[in-house]
Amino acid sequence: MTGVLQRFGSVQTGAAWLDEAGEDDVLVRQSRAVGLPAVAPDIFGLAVRVRLAEDRHGDLLFASTGLGRLSRFTLTASRSPYRRPLTTLLPYRTAAGPVVLAAVHVDERTVDLRCAVLAGPWRTFGQLRLDTDSPTTASDAPISFDPLLHTLPGLENYGWVRQLREPSYFTARRSRS
């Protein structure tokens, strides 16, 4: 599905994309990680592709967690994708230090976006408005989100994060080619 991400320019992390006000067109995919039947709790995911200038894009991946100092780094299951917050689990390197991003559903079409320096307090930096009625690609078209290859301005992956994630993303890239 498509959407619009509005950044408020209200935080100071040293990451240009987080700190500057702006509006971005996005492509969004919501998913169930384990793929259990709908009545069973599952870990939910939210993938966001932000269109950047010059035919580039940046990808963000969120998974259902908590928002506490430790629970922001812990996967949690839920029966609904709208009842649990989601975080990036692993931090991005910024001038302010390690930053974790969070997505908190206000309702089925609105998601508040927050950031925190590691285990610090959450600060709202934007809002995602989803257009759930108009997908931009055919339902069978493959869409591959890769936050290692497609980063947003100022959000760098730590070397240890890259080493942790690279084997699974490498395997996924190979399976698609």
Image (cartoon, rainbow, N blue to C red):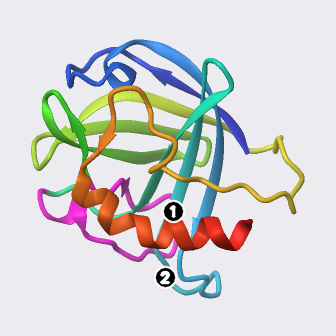
> Residue type at mark 1?
Gly
Q: Quadrant of the C terminus?
A: bottom right
* The one of 141 and 84 positioned closer to us in this rendering: 141
Asked if residue 60 is positioned above or below residue 5 in the image, the reply reads: below
Residue at image location 54% in from the left, 82% down from the top? 34
Asked if residue 146 is positioned above or below residue 49 in the image, the reply reads: below
Q: Is residue 93 magenta?
A: no
Q: Nearer the viewer, mark 1 or mark 2?
A: 1
What is the x, y in percent for residue 169?
51, 65
In screen coordinates, is 51 left or right of 170?
Answer: right
The CA span between labels 1 and 2 is: 13 Å
Asked if labels 2 and 1 touch by Cβ distance under 8 angstroms, the answer is no
Count residues near mark 1 (Cα–Cα under 10 Å), then give few for <14, some for 14-19, many for 20+: many
- From the image, give the main secondary structure of the stretch colored magenta: loop
Determine the secondary structure under disc 2. Answer: loop
Residue at image location 35% in from the left, 25% down from the top? 18
The residue to which callout 1 is attached is 45
The residue to which callout 2 is attached is 41
Residue 122 seen in this snapshot: no
Residue at image location 13% in from the left, 63% down from the top? 70
**Region of the chain picked out in magenta, as a range:** 69-90
